[in-house]
Image (cartoon, grey):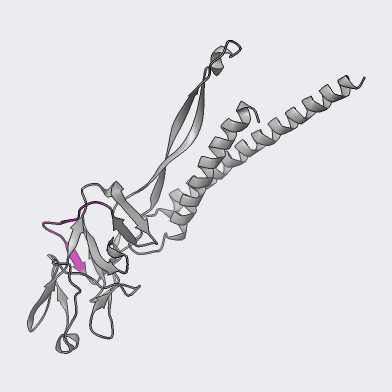
Amino acid sequence: MDTTGYLALSRIDALTRGLDVTANNLANASTDGFKQQRVLFTDYLSHQHGSTIMGGEKTLTYNQDKATYLDTLQGELRQTGNPLDLAINGQGYFMVRTPQGIRLTRGGQFQRSADGTIVDSSGNPLLDDQRRNITLTPQDQILPLAIESNGLISTEKGAIARLGIATVDNPNTLHAEGNRLFNPTTELRPVAAPEVRQGMLEASNVNAVEETTAMIKTQREYDLNFQLLQTEFTRRLNAIDKITSEATV
């Protein structure tokens, strides 16, 4: 394969990754707490050497899929009226305990388990500011639950716990696990003044119209690069046929 083929393939590889990320964003446009991902592309420069290299071919620019990063822009908050639906207005994440360790989430649809522990939709316990499971006693379970904006959970009998709202210094160090959980690969720190909204959920921050437009644009560029590969393959095949036919004359 010649230089044209390698350049086109490098771009096709990057575009394929871009299509996968965009498709996943679109699939989660209605997933509460979902944060869309973006692909960062960079150029990889290859310096050519030799006396037969043309001036414009001394540096070849390949396309490289550098990284995927989270867009942490807040989604729209909507009213649900469910006392265990929670949303964070501003920075911070809820902490939940999974079999793999503590994870962060903006998906605030919680419920009571059979033993009174407050868990997410996957059964992961919600943690307080001391990183302990939040569990309601049988008496607390039958009383109305109030959650203040600072995260304090209480009933008419008094305070039960305070939500653990944490964040990291660099959001780019968060690794998405599934559609709602994030693995903090750096040290967690508590949010000094969180703003929790009870009876609300944060929607996905995906703009379906923008993502659909981006997918169409990426698909068109993919098709153009694929056509370039096909044209180049045909050109080389015709050249080989011509050389072979001349050699047999």
The residue located at (35%, 64%) in the rendering is 32
On the rendered image, what quadrant is the N terminus found in? top right
Residue 20: where, in percent of width, then height? 50, 51
Residue 18: where, in percent of width, then height? 48, 45
The residue located at (19%, 79%) in the rendering is 135
The stretch drawn in magenta includes residue 194 = yes
Residue 140: where, in percent of width, then height? 15, 85
Q: Is residue 112 above or below residue 67?
A: below
> Can residue 176 be spotted in the picture?
yes
Q: Residue furthest right?
A: 249
The part of the image, by quadrant, that contains residue 98 is bottom left
Q: Residue furthest left?
A: 158
Depth check, front residue: 131 or 231 = 131
Q: Residue furthest top?
A: 51
Residue 21: where, in percent of width, then height? 46, 51
> Can residue 75 be spotted in the picture?
no
On the rendered image, what quadrant is the C terminus found in? top right
Depth check, front residue: 224 or 160 = 160
Question: With 20 as the anchor, is 135 left or right in this view?
Answer: left
The stretch drawn in magenta includes residue 12 = no
The part of the image, by quadrant, that contains residue 152 is bottom left
Question: With 213 as the anchor, is 242 left or right in this view?
Answer: right
Question: With 214 as the anchor, is 71 left or right in this view?
Answer: left
Specify start and end residues of the magenta stretch as a single range.
186-197
Depth check, front residue: 49 or 110 = 49
Q: Is residue 8 above or below residue 95?
A: above
Q: Is residue 72 above or below residue 81?
A: above
